[in-house]
Structures are given as C-alpha cells and as structure tokens.
C-alpha cells in the first residue's frame, strides 16, 4: 500500500501530497533505480558500491537553489576524495541533466533522473504529486547502506545545512 501524506510541504503556495514515508537515521537505505545521463538504467548502490554516499534530492537543476546546491556538492566531492560518491536526483530529463552539467562544469557528482520510474521519490518520501517533482532532502548513507544522516527541507527553497551533511560524512569516514 502506497502511503500518501498531505500538507508536509507547499509548492508554488499549494499544499502537496507526498508519496512514501520519510527515511530515518539508522535504517537500511532502500536501493533505487537511477536513470543516468545517457538514458541507461542502473541501481544506485551498485553504481556507488564501497563508497559513502551523499544523496541529494532536488526539484530541478535549472532552478537557482538546486543549481547552487549541486555546484556546492560538486566542490565538496572533490575535497572528500574517492571514498565518497555524491548523487543528485531530480525529475529533470537525462538530456537536460547532461546539458546542465556541461554548462556548469559539474563533473564530481552523479546527476540522475527519477522522471520515468519515480522509484527514488516513492522510496525516500520525496515525490510530490500531482506536480511530479521531488521535495528537497539530503541523506548520508554509509558503505553498508545504513542511513547516517537524513534531512528534509521544510521549504523547497531552503538549502541543506552543508556543515551538518559534511560533518556526518567525515564521521562515517572516521575523519
């Protein structure tokens, strides 16, 4: 049975219905299907195995807040090293993500689309219907797929607390 929750977040001033439950710290992170920029499908945790993951859920890369957030995570990913993978999930078409990454010079994060399957949105409690966009959230998942940090932004225009996210990653890495 699909869980639907209404009134958690507004989009364009209208209360939205969110599909799925929120992810909790300590639980095993559900794997999800990703659609890469070349349109191929994969599984998120297979693509990033043996890594600590930052998973950022954003509505669209072509908005100012999502643009800033993805660029910031791109900069941080370069500093964090090869043991960390950053996935940015949006409902943008893969071709739009590829174009955006090229124009923005983003090459340290893996931008993936949930537009076809909505697998991530439903499993992580971020899919807003009927607008079919993702609500903003960020997760840190360790190498054993345990969620070590989870934050859902109360307003889609709010950026995540980068210091908290990075502190959680460093704690998982033992740094």
Image: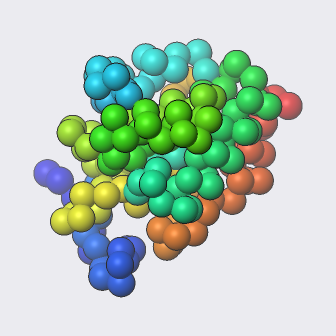
| Total numbered circles | 0
Instruction: Say above or below: 31 vs 163.
Output: above
Rendering quarter of residue 135: bottom left
Q: Horizontal placement of 2 versus 144: left or right? A: left
Q: Residue 34, can we see it?
A: no
Outermost residue, bottom direction? 13
Q: How is the image coloured?
A: rainbow
Q: Image point 48% across, 41% down: which residue?
A: 100
Outermost residue, right direction? 175
Q: Image point 43% across, 17% down: which residue?
A: 46
Q: Image point 61% across, 53% down: which residue?
A: 69
Q: Horizontal placement of 59 versus 175: left or right? A: left
Q: Residue 165 location, x and y as percent?
A: 69, 48
Q: Horizontal placement of 154 versus 79: left or right? A: left
Q: Residue 174, can we see it?
A: yes
Task: Please name whichever residue, 83 or 173, is drawn nearer the observer in this view of the structure.
Answer: 83
Instruction: Say above or below: 59 vs 15.
Output: above
Task: Please name whichever residue, 61 or 55, is drawn nearer the observer in this view of the structure.
Answer: 61
Outermost residue, left direction? 1
Outermost residue, front direction? 103
Rendering quarter of residue 82: top right
Q: The C terminus appears in which quarter of the rendering?
A: top right
Q: Residue 169 location, x and y as percent?
A: 71, 38
Q: Residue 128 location, x and y as percent?
A: 29, 62
Q: Image point 26% across, 43% down: which residue?
A: 115
Instruction: Say above or below: 13 vs 33.
Output: below
Q: Residue 63 location, x and y as percent?
A: 48, 60
């Amino acid at each position: 049975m699909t869980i639907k929750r209404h009134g958690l977040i507004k989009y364009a001033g209208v209360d939205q219905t969110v599909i799925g439950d929120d992810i909790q710290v300590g639980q095993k992170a559900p794997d999800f299907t990703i659609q890469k920029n070349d349109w191929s499908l994969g599984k998120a945790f297979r693509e990033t195995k043996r890594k600590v993951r930052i998973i950022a859920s954003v509505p669209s890369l072509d908005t100012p807040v999502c643009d800033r957030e993805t660029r910031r995570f791109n900069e941080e990913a370069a500093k964090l090293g090869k043991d960390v993978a950053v996935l940015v999930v949006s409902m943008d078409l893969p071709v739009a993500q590829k174009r955006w990454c090229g124009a923005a010079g983003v090459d340290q994060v893996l931008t993936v689309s949930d537009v076809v399957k909505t697998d991530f949105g439903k499993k992580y409690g971020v899919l807003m219907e009927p607008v079919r966009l993702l609500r903003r959230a960020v997760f840190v998942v360790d190498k054993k797929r345990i969620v070590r940090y989870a934050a859902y932004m109360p307003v889609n225009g709010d950026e995540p607390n980068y210091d908290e996210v990075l502190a959680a990653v460093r704690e998982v890495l033992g740094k």
